[in-house]
Image: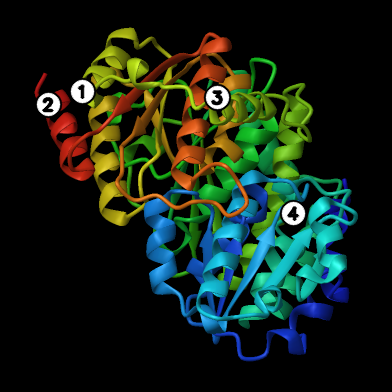
Amino acid sequence: MGWLDLPDSMRLGTGFASTAHSEALDGVTSFNVLGMGGSSLTPEVLRTLFPDTDIVLNVFDTVNPVQISDALEMIDLSTAAFAVASKSGTTVEPLSLEGVFRSALNEIGMDNAGDHFVALSDPDTPLARRASDGQFAIHVPTPSNVGGRFSALSGFGMFPASICGMPTDEMTERAIAMADQCRREDADNPGVELGLFMAKNALRGRDKVTFAMSPSLERFGLWLEQLLAESTGKNGRGLIPVAGEPVLPEHTYGDDRQFVCIALEGEDVAENPAYENHPTYWIKVPDLPAIAGEFFRWEFATSIAASAMGIYPFDQPDVESAKQLAREALESGAEVQADLVSLNDAVEAIIDKSQEGDYVAIAAYLPESDVLTNAISDLRTSISNATESATTFGYGPRYLHSTGQLHKGGPNSVQLLVITQPSDIDIAVPEQSYTLGELMMSQAVGDVQACKAKQRRTEMAQIDGDAVNDIKAVAENIAHV
């Protein structure tokens, strides 16, 4: 429950301000976060809200070798700093990326590669101990009494913000103000009000919490997905967050929906007649620094909602199963081609198995891009039109650290569609026996196996051609069936 005290710790600068302006990072032009889930999603939200900073903030929460290869070309390594962000200090993805980027620095003749690295981790983790041995320029200790997805206002989120020159003083004020409001024992408590809204509707069968964001806040949906899915998706229950969904024809929204509309002052969410016929909660964010208050409001509300639904929000019992199966797949090098089908066949199978109250979770182990996300959006629309089901979407392996818990531990109303694609580009991980591509595929296979072990309906598809064109073609094919 230490997250309740984080707004006050922000005022004291605990965990970030005291080290954010260390001379060790003088001359840095980019700050690059290597993390997954709770250690990376807050910086991802903040970099989109505050793009015009003196130091560029990048977030690498993927092991996709195509994306990392592009990053190695894009970044000026000589003036880059890297944050290895892992609460446990053992997360395989950021540690693998650390090896790749350290090797890249050595290859350009940077003998002091460790001076370019910051460790963000709880005290006395393996990562923290390496930092104390001098392998990092700075160790930013993160609070051990705060779970990863509740750590937005800790060093995981605020150290990168402070390094890059974001308005952390104003963010602190907004976080403290929201925390004060959430201490009220009356009807004006914004965290209790929102939490009870979500729980009340979910207990009546409306468990699909569908977000509609104004343009500047779109990436906030990634953070919300993790918070709700991993906190409540267990023991066959949960809130199912639906973010980034296109506006659909009104008849496709079933009685399993509730909506939360979040708009930055001066911006609007897309119009949708469904708001008139389904429970809808509206939030107005007065300015950009107020996002810190929203982090706290939603953490509080999620805890309230979970309590009202009889769910313990601070564990993630089904995350480890996929990790273990991924490790086994990586160690065995098992061939999985026999389990792969075409995307069109996979989607047709999902449509055939569709039942009322389902949702389709699309997980793409593909290089992230706006054009690909837009193609997936077309596919989501076609699937919803064909099934009247909600859809979700996440890039792998990022989603494993967020909605992955919900897929396995939440209601068995999920149909998981995992999309993969072979690539000629791969990157060896220094001092390890695997490549980034092998790690990524093992994670896809491990998650599919974990979901099937939980009797989840799962399809694993492979795209052999151009991913964008193939996805658009399948979407169009479904639309005309």
Residue type, numbered disc 4:
Ser
Instruction: Find disc 4 in the rendering and name its residue.
Output: 151
Q: Secondary structure at mark 1?
A: helix
Name which of mark 3 and mark 4 comes first in the sequence: 4
Instruction: Give how far across and how far down residue 465 sits, in percent.
Output: 18, 38
In front here: 174 or 341?
A: 341
Q: Compared to 254, does 438 lie above or below? A: below
**How many residues crowd around disc 3 within 10 Å: few (fewer than 14), some, or many (20 or more)?**
few
Q: Secondary structure at mark 4?
A: loop
Instruction: Find disc 3 in the rendering and name its residue.
Output: 332
Tag 2–tag 3 contact (CB < 8 Å) = no
Residue type, numbered disc 3:
Ser
* Mark in the foreground, 3 or 4: 3
Q: CA distance from mark 4 to mark 1?
A: 40 Å
Image quadrant of residue 139?
A: bottom right
In front here: 40 or 169?
A: 40
Q: Which mark is residue 344?
A: 1
Name which of mark 4 and mark 1 comes first in the sequence: 4
**How many residues crowd around disc 1 within 10 Å: few (fewer than 14), some, or many (20 or more)?**
some
Q: Which mark is residue 82?
A: none
Tag 2–tag 4 contact (CB < 8 Å) = no
Q: Compared to 115, does 240 lie above or below? A: above
Residue type, numbered disc 2:
Asn
Q: Is residue 287 visible?
A: no
Q: Compared to 292, does 339 lie above or below? A: above
Instruction: Find disc 2 in the rendering and name its residue.
Output: 477
Q: Secondary structure at mark 3?
A: helix
